[in-house]
Amino acid sequence: MRSVQLPIDSFRQLRGKVALPGAVLLLALSMASCGGGTTGTQTGTSTPANKPQAYFAPNVAGSTYSVGIGISPALTSPLTYTLDDTALTFTQTTYLPQTQPGPQVLNAGDITMGQRGLRILGVTANYVYEDSSSAAKYVPVAPASQAGSYAVELANQAGGLIQLVGQPAAPMVAATACPNSGSSQTYLFITIPGGLTTSAIGSLDAWDPTTDTAYGVVQINSSGSSVTLQNIQQFTLPSMGGTGKPTQPGPLSATGACASSFFGDTTVVPGQVVITDPNTNGTGVPPQATLAIGPTGLLVEDSGSNASGKLPSTSPALTYNNVLGAGTGAVGLPQPSGALSTKALTGAQYLGFIYGAGQYIGHNPPTENWSSNIASFGFPSSVQPSCPQVSAVAPIYGGDFPINPVTGLRDPTSSNSNNPNYPYGNCDFVIDLGTETTAGLYPDATVWVGAGYGANTSVATTYSFQAVAIAGQLQDGKYAIFLIGEDSTQPWAIYLLQSI
C-alpha cells in the first residue's frame, strides 16, 4: 500500500478521467486549518460588496458545455461563477486537472443591474472544446445567444442563484471560509433533483422520488480543518407514501476535511478514502461530496454524481455520495430557532428560478424536456386577483416572465404589452406552504401550475402537485424558500430569495 498526497483541488476533481497506478491507493489529505474570526455559522466576515467574488456552484443535471463538432457533453465537475459588481463583468469557469492545464473559462460577459437586485448577464464570449488530431483545446466562438442569463445575489455578495442561457438554474455560495462556529449548527436541506429515469439503465443524474432523499436535516460542527456532520436525517417525498425513508440512506454521521482550493474553502466528504485501482476492476474513483457554507449560512452541496466509480458498500451501487442530497446535490438553510411568521414569509417578495428537471435519457445530454426560468414570487395584492384562484393555507403567488417578442426569450428587464405586471412577471404559479411541522419545514406544501406557464405545454388547465419546502432567514435578514416536488412527468425545484 502506498500513501499519496494530493492537492485538495486535484482530489476533488479526481473522478472519471484518469486511471491511477498501483493496486490500492490511500488518499490521505493533509489539511491546513482555516483561520479567521467567527460570524455566527461561518468563519470569516462577509465579503465586501462590489468586489470580484467567486462563487462555488454544484453540477446540476442538464448543465452542458459546447464542443466544436456540435455535441454538448455534460459537465463533469462543479463550477465557479465570478461576478464583479464594479467592473460589471462575469465568468463561468470549470476545472478538470486531468484534461485541462488549469481553470477553463466556458462563458464570460457583462452585467446589467436590474430592478429588485436582479443581475442581467450578457454572454459575450463562449469557449468550446475541440478535440482535433493534433491537440485538445478550448477555442472562442461567437455565443449562440447573448441574452437570457440571470443571477440573483445575496447582500455583500455572499451567494445567490444563477442561470446561464441554455443551462439549468443553480444555487451558488461564496466559500470564503471553512465552517468554525464554535458550536453545532442545524441545517435543513433539499435535494437538487436530476430527471426521472425513463429506462432500466442506471443513471448518473436521475432522481427517484420514491426511493431517494428529497429533504433532511443535519447538524454541522468543526474543529480546525475537520468538519463533522452529525444526526443526519433523510426523507423521501411524503406524497410518494411508503416508509418515508430512502432505500439507501446516508450514514448517521460523517467527517469531512475543509481546505482552500480552486472552488474556495470547501469541505470534501469523506476527507480520506481508500480507492481500488480502476485499471484492475473498473470501479473507478468513488464519488466525493463537496460542501460549502457561505457567510450568511447558505449551504450548497455537490454530490459527486459524475464520478467514474461507485459509492462503496451500496447495493445497487450508487453513483453519487449520499451524505446529504441525492440527485446532483443539495441546497440548505440554517434551521430557524423557532416557528416562522407565516404572514411575514408569505408577504415578502422574491426573485428566483423554477427548475423542471425533465426526464433522464442518458449521460449525453443528461436530461430531456427540462426547463429553467427566472421567476418572481410574492405578488402585491393589486396583482393577486389576476392570479389562479385556489384554496390555500399560506399562498405565495408568482411565476415566470413573458417572452420578449424581439429576442424570443423570457425577459424580466423591460415593460411591454406582454407584461402588464412589470416589474413582476406572469402570475401562473401558486405555492401553498401548508403547515410548518417543525421550525422552517413545510412537508405538505402544494404547488399549482397554471395553464399559461411557459413549460406547461401538455396541460390545458391548472393542476397541482405535492412538494416539500424549507424556509428561513439568512444572516442578512432576508427570507429564503427552497422547494422540491414531483408531478406525473418530472421533478420540480423552486429556489427563491427575498428581493426587497
Image (cartoon, rainbow, N blue to C red):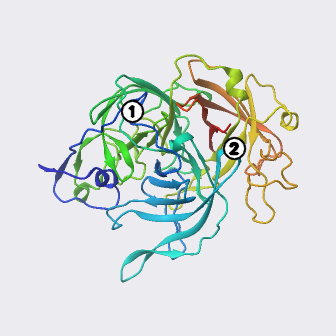
| Label number found at residue 116 | 2
Residue closest to the eye, 82 or 25: 82
**How many residues crowd around disc 2 within 10 Å: few (fewer than 14), some, or many (20 or more)?**
some
Whole-number angstrom distance, CA of label 2 to CA of label 1: 39 Å
Q: Amino acid at mark 1?
A: Gly
Q: Is residue 202 visible?
A: no
Mark 1 secondary-structure assignment: loop
x, y percent for residue 71: 53, 70
Number of labels in the image equals 2
Residue closest to the eye, 239 or 105: 105
The relative height of residue 184 versus residue 171 in the rendered view (above or below) is above
x, y percent for residue 18: 29, 61
Q: Nearer the viewer, mark 2 or mark 1?
A: 2
Q: Earlier in the sequence, mark 2 or mark 1?
A: 2
Q: Quadrant of the C terminus?
A: top right
Mark 2 secondary-structure assignment: helix
**How many residues crowd around disc 1 within 10 Å: few (fewer than 14), some, or many (20 or more)?**
some
The relative height of residue 144 versus residue 331 in the rendered view (above or below) is below
Q: Residue at x 81, y 25 (%)?
A: 391
Q: Amino acid at mark 2?
A: Arg
**Residue 144 is drawn in which quadrant?**
bottom right
x, y percent for residue 309: 33, 51
The relative height of residue 213 versus residue 168 in the rendered view (above or below) is above
x, y percent for residue 375: 70, 45
Query: From this viewpoint, which residue is outermost toward the left?
Result: 1
Residue closest to the eye, 190 or 170: 170
| Label number found at residue 274 | none
497 left or right of 132?
Answer: right
Q: Is residue 470 visible?
A: yes
Which residue corresponds to mark 1? 250
